[in-house]
Image (tube, helix red, strand yellow):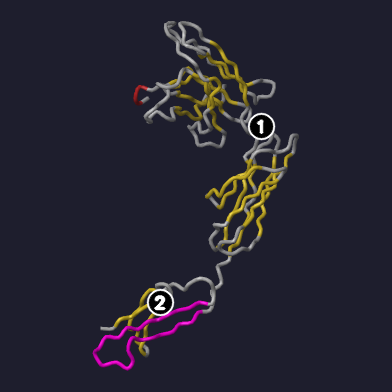
Amino acid sequence: MANNIAGVRWYEVRDPSSPTVFQWGTYAPDATTSTPTNRWMASAALDGAGNLALGYSASSASVYPSIRYTSRRPGDSPGTLSQTETTIAAGGGSELAYGRWGDYSSMSVDPSDDCTFWYTQEYYAASSNAGWQTRIASFKLPGCGTAATSTSLTSSPNPSGPGDTVTLTATVSGSGTPGPTGSVTFADGATTLGSAPLSGSTATYPVSTLAAGTHSLTAVYDGDTANASSTSPVHTQTVNAAPKTASATTLSSSGSPSVAGSPVTFTATVTGSGSITPTGTVSFVEGSTTLWSGTLSSGTATFPTA
């Protein structure tokens, strides 16, 4: 890697009888930063749901050799390990003189459920010549061995007006025990609106930034260790445009009567019947001829003649 930093090159090979490299990548997410981390001595495995976990040693100028892992879900972009990097054991020292970092990295999947990852790796709790220690950890990734869920979404009020607070309510139903926990993420098309925790089987999220028009809203339950994630059908929220209120326009001049050739300033004042000051343009017309058009400023527009 750049800057003489060690990264992990990984491959996913499918069909053992006729091996095919399905995807591959290099994991070094901070290699180009000012404080890069070395990652080495790695081991990877796949669970029954297609999740991939990668464990390794990690160290930097400010981090003693530690044990970490990262992972990817089957739907993540190919060649990426985009799930959060997790520290299993933070090192407290370095190897001073032994001269060998043992090949003690092993990531395996428990055959009893095809979901539980077991990982072992060495680290140093304190600096010494050969006082290495071993840590064994287990974990599961979402979507493996989990109960199916379904998510529905409602909104109130619907339709609404611009600036109205619309309450989005997601209801998550589980097919197993324990029931769903965690959080729900709400989106307007491809734009994330925000997240809210489940309380019982529902999560609510207020939003007041929906513009006039129709909005395709969805709710995504993120899943937990016992329940799979799920996405609601698209829910259409209609935001009606604010109704136009009546307005009145008056016209005044700086001098009437006036002398031919003398400058005269015409002022148009527009008032509305609502709480919003009118905006837009005003056209000054003589008969069928438009003399000038100007933009309203605080409800008025002026036209100075030469």
222 lies left or right of 32: right
Q: What stretch is highlighted in magenta?
A: 247-272
The image shows residue 108, relative to residue 188, as above or below, that is above
The image shows residue 31, relative to residue 244, as above or below, that is above
Residue at the front extreme, as displayed: 255
148 lies left or right of 21: right
Question: What type is the residue that disc 2 sits on?
Answer: Thr
Q: Are marks 2 and 1 in contact (CB under 8 Å)?
A: no
Percent position of residue 172, x then y: 70, 44
| Quadrant holding the N terminus | top left
Percent position of residue 219, x then y: 62, 48
Percent position of residue 121, x then y: 54, 15
Residue 277 inside the magenta-drawn segment: no
Q: Residue 300 carries which label?
A: 2
Q: Which of the pair 173/279 is nearer the observer?
A: 279
Q: Residue at x 35, y 84 (%)?
A: 266
Helix, strand or loop status at disc 2: strand
Judging by the rendered image, the residue that carries numbered circle 1 is 225
